[in-house]
């Protein structure tokens, strides 16, 4: 009887401790594909550093290709190289290498040329996505999913 009471007590302690508020929820991984990366993302960390106050970069990634051209758009709203909002239209594709790594590559609209390099999408979950410049493992961009790009940024009226 003593053994049974001890076992029940241990099970009760385990049950209570598993319901602790200190439990950390780990977001579920999302498949890296057109559907998984589509949406609006805000750059929150670049090359291991948080963005400085007032700097921003948002990606609006479309999943569905344009019916006429078959291209998928990726619109960038940023002020990383300017004191004012800039909207940069581009188109992208995803490709997978023989190891199963997925890369995003693209080109800018209006004759702007190709992106300087492909990006390895190294991780993706419901809230975060990490891109690494192919050939420069120190150039890491961490994006956080968000509802939308702020209206003053879309309008191009936000400045530092």
Image (spheres, grey):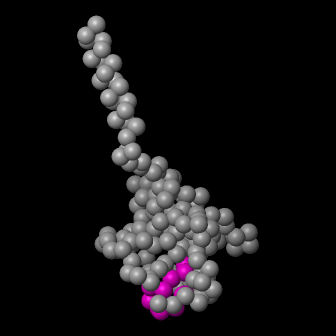
Q: Which is more toward the observer, 61 or 110?
A: 61
Q: Residue at x 31, y 21 (%)?
A: 9
Q: Is residue 94 visible?
A: no
Where is 134 relative to 108, above or below? above
What residue span does the magenta drawing correspond to? Answer: 76-86
Q: Which is more toward the observer, 66 or 96?
A: 66
Dominant SS of magenta comes to: loop
How many numbered marks appear?
0
In the image, residue 66 lies at what x, y percent?
Answer: 70, 70
> What is the quadrant of the N terminus in the image?
top left
Q: Residue at x 62, y 68 (%)?
A: 62
Q: Quadrant of residue 97?
A: bottom left
Q: Which is more toward the observer, 96 or 149?
A: 149
Where is 43 relative to 100, above or below? below
Q: Is residue 124 visible?
A: yes
* Membership of 153 in magenta stretch: no
In the image, residue 106 lies at what x, y percent?
Answer: 53, 75
Outermost residue to the bottom: 83
* Membership of 80 in magenta stretch: yes
In the image, residue 76 lies at what x, y percent?
Answer: 55, 79
Q: Residue at x 52, y 69 (%)?
A: 41
Q: Residue at x 51, y 82 (%)?
A: 78
Where is 157 relative to 42, above or below? below
In the image, residue 27 lies at what x, y percent?
Answer: 45, 51
């Amino acid at each position: 009887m003593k053994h049974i009471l001890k076992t029940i007590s241990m099970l009760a302690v385990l049950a209570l401790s598993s319901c602790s508020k200190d439990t950390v929820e780990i977001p579920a991984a999302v498949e890296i594909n057109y559907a998984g990366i589509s949406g609006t993302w805000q750059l929150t960390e670049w090359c291991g550093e948080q963005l400085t106050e007032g700097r921003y970069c948002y990606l609006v990634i479309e999943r569905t290709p344009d019916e006429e051209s078959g291209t998928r758009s990726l619109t960038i709203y940023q002020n990383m190289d300017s004191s004012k909002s800039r909207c940069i239209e581009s188109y992208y594709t995803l490709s997978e290498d023989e190891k199963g790594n997925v890369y995003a590559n693209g080109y800018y609209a209006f004759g702007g040329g190709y992106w300087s390099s492909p990006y390895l999408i190294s991780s993706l979950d419901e809230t975060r996505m990490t891109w690494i410049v192919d050939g420069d493992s120190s150039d890491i961009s961490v994006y956080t999913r968000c509802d939308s790009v702020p209206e003053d940024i879309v309008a191009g009226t936000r400045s530092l």
